[in-house]
Amino acid sequence: MQRKLLAAALFASLPLVAAAQSSVSIYGIADASIAREDTDAVDGSRTVVNSGNQSSSRIGFRGTEDLGNGLKAIFNLEAGVALDTGAGDSALFGRRAVVGLQGAFGQVTLGREYSPIASVAGQSDILGQGFYGTNLSAFNSGRLTRRLSNSVNYKSDSMGGFKVLAAYGLGETTTGPSLDTAGVALEYANGPLFLGAGYHQIERLATEDDKEYTFGAGYKFGAIEVKGNYMVADRAGANNKFEQANIGASVAVGGAGKVYVNVQRNEQASAKGNLIALAYSHSLSKRTNVYTTLASMRNNSAGVFGINASGVNVTPPATAPGADPTALAIGMRHTF
């Protein structure tokens, strides 16, 4: 009788064991703010409700399945959501859409993935690629490549603090240059120190390739953290080289608060722009915080550089060179 009961108990537990070998989770961010934005162009000032002043609002699905012998199947689908209107991004899972394998060798994925340069830039931005004044202005303007569609990607496990990232994005064109993008990055993380460098090469023209590269660093000592980066988009042709440099610091205050400052320099040919950004975040819990963010860009007579937050863009029109945009927002972010 006892043997029968034991056998029945073991049989009943089998579905639970199988279920424990795979998992799917739903996660996301809801971020909204009220903002005053001014491009400094004619009729360029407005008060708005924004989505994504600190982090782009999103919903995602990710999961793993244990295949045995240390091998796992993985996937991630992530969609952007405009919290102010409820609208989704033009591409349903345009933020990330990958499937792949993970093991002792690292991680290999296929689909739409963040580029190697994006990883370095994100980890060396004191604003966490959120708040007004982030280095996302170099990506959202179309100068640097943040995500790769139709891509094959590799990320190694940490090897003594070093990590290798490599990607190849297929342009999938039928005529003309391939538009293929090849990228690689090397990162080093050891305690409070981060160092990273990345490079992309894009076959956009038949005679010459576009080149993108990024160097980033960060160090944390006590309540103070310092981060900086230098990013270049060197497109083929005259006067197309874009350069951006960032240096910033954050200080934890009062246990629940953090103050941020970032200084940014943009250059392309004769156009130049200097930015100063300030932000404050106050945690109400582990998943909820309130914040305020302020930034001001000063362009020279040829500059039309703008201010970006995670999901927001405040840029003068091309017809208004020399305009000096400013932006201020107060918002709330909840992660789940």
Image: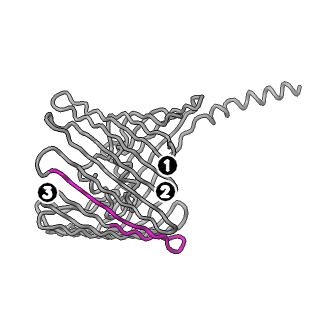
Q: Which residue is mark 3?
A: 269
Q: Which comes sooner in the sequence, label 3 or label 2?
A: 3
Identified by mark 2, the residue type is Thr
State the predominant SS element of the stretch in magenta: strand
Classify mark 1: residues with Cα within 10 Å, few (<14), some (14-19) or many (20+).
Answer: few
- Asked if the residues shown at circle 1 and circle 2 are in contact, with their CB atoms under 8 angstroms apart, the answer is yes
Q: Nearer the viewer, residue 207 or 99?
A: 207
- Asked if the residues shown at circle 1 and circle 3 are in contact, with their CB atoms under 8 angstroms apart, the answer is no
Identified by mark 3, the residue type is Ala
Classify mark 2: residues with Cα within 10 Å, few (<14), some (14-19) or many (20+).
Answer: some
Picture coordinates of residue 252, whole percent (x, y): 49, 70
Whole-angstrom CA distance, mark 1 to mark 3, is 43 Å
Task: Give the residue furthest to the front.
Answer: 160
Does the magenta segment cover residue 242? yes
Side of 7 relative to 180 (left or right): right
Question: Magenta residues?
Answer: 240-262
Q: Which residue is mark 2?
A: 335
In this rendering, the answer to whether 128 lies above or below 177 is: below
User: What residue lies at 50% left-to-right and 63% top-to-bottom?
Assistant: 288
Picture coordinates of residue 30, whole percent (x, y): 44, 57
Residue 105 appearing in the image: yes
